[in-house]
Amino acid sequence: MAKYNIALLPGDGIGKDVMDAAQIVMDKLALDAEYFPGDIGWEFWCREGDPLPQRTIDLLKRTDCCLFGAITSKPKEEAEDELIPELKGKGLIYSSPIVRLRQEFNLRTNLRPCKAYKGNPLNYRDDIDLVVFRENTECLYVGIEFHPLPAELMQTLQNLHPKMKRFGQVDLEDIAVSLRIITRQACQNIIRDAFEYAVKYGYKTVTVVEKPNVIRETSGLMVREARKIAKEYPTIQLWEANIDAMCMWLVKNPQDYGVLVTSNMFGDIISDLCAQLVGGLGFSSSGNIGDHYAVFEPTHGSAPKYAGQYKVNPTAMLLTVKLMLDWLGETDSAHRLEKAVSEVIAEDRVKTYDMGGRNSSLEVAQAVAARL
Ligand code: IPM
Ligand code: MG
């Protein structure tokens, strides 16, 4: 029996291209694993009305962790249009399978390292080493939304909050509400993860990125918990920044920052910004990590126009495999893989179109494998 059972969910578009690239390096590392491919994505939405079929959830439950490619999402009306005729008009609602996986498996921590590898022509600067800790199950992603607003909710909110009075005359059809829910436990978990990581990997600062001057309760809770937990880590400095200013500082002086910790929505936004500082989504890996399970995915989307062409940069996926190896405790393989990836970048010979090259995704993976 293999040491690890790993689910492979290529998903949509270039998800399969980068998964094939990942397989090349995992084979070369001779990871003692058995791989279990599973169904996820747009195709299953259109044919079955569910982009994350129950059989896939069951498959994941039988494995140690999951490597995920990419997913296509479309707005509500377009999603309905693409269903097979038998499924149309049944009130099926498309919801993002990756967001569901994060919640279903309580993958509460989203870890997104953004490091500038030496020699990458796409680096904004060469001395950037950021790691985003994004709370992964709450905030605006809880999916508790109302449109039209139910009359009871309008009434209750008006009874409870004086500021709701100004909406009293708005037609219930003409008002939408999305709830931003943040629990103390989730704040504590993500902040603690960020500090532990800073200690383990030698970062000097943890910056909590929120907006407590306006969103006093939810952002306020996060910042207050950060201040408390920071006291347990005297060797690490806690910095505080508002999300808007942080975007500016990251463009101005990204080299000054180390670990960033934030809530789900701000983390989504800022991790794209950080990714672009180190070459774009082709370089940005991520792990959705819970207490007992984890799903690893490159931060990029499914880039449908490049699907099946083996054109896109597989580096994000290869670095995602590195995160998975770290999580599995295969630290030596993880280190070797990162070193091989960084050497291929530094050598500047085998590269995909985004870096000005002409090589395929698989050739890049083979070049990395050759150095392992
Ligand atoms: C990400 C993506 C997802 C998110 C989408 C695809 C639902 O943007 O992983 O950053 O919003 O979390
Ligand atoms: Mg995103």
Image: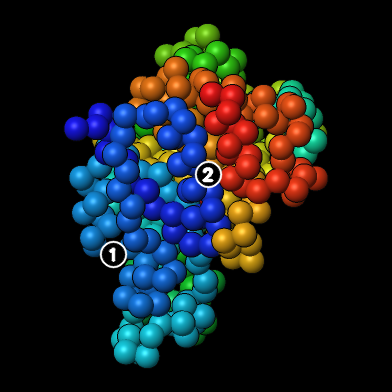
In this rendering, would 219 be left or right of 53? right
Crowd class of label 2 (few under 14; some 14 to 19; many from 20; radius 10 Å):
many
Q: Quarter holding the C terminus? A: top right
Disc 1 is placed on an element classified as: loop
In the image, residue 135 sits, relative to residue 31, either above or below, namely below
Q: CA distance from mark 1 to mark 2?
A: 25 Å
**Viewer-proximal residue among 189 and 158:** 189
User: What residue sits right under mark 1 in the picture?
Assistant: 53
Residue shown at 24% from the left, 62% from the top: 54
Residue 136 position in % (x across, y down)? 42, 45
Residue 38 position in % (x across, y down)? 32, 56
Residue shown at 54% from the left, 53% from the top: 17
Tell me which corner region of the image, top left, top right, bottom left or bottom right, holds residue 196: top left
The kind of residue on which mark 2 rests is Ala
Q: Quarter holding the N terminus? A: top left
**Viewer-proximal residue among 208 and 58:** 58
Residue shown at 59% from the left, 24% from the top: 371
Res. 132 visible in picture: no
User: What residue sits right under mark 2 in the picture?
Assistant: 21
The kind of residue on which mark 1 rests is Pro
Tell me which corner region of the image, top left, top right, bottom left or bottom right, holds residue 370: top right
Residue 238 position in % (x across, y down)? 56, 21
In the image, residue 210 sits, relative to residue 54, either above or below, namely above
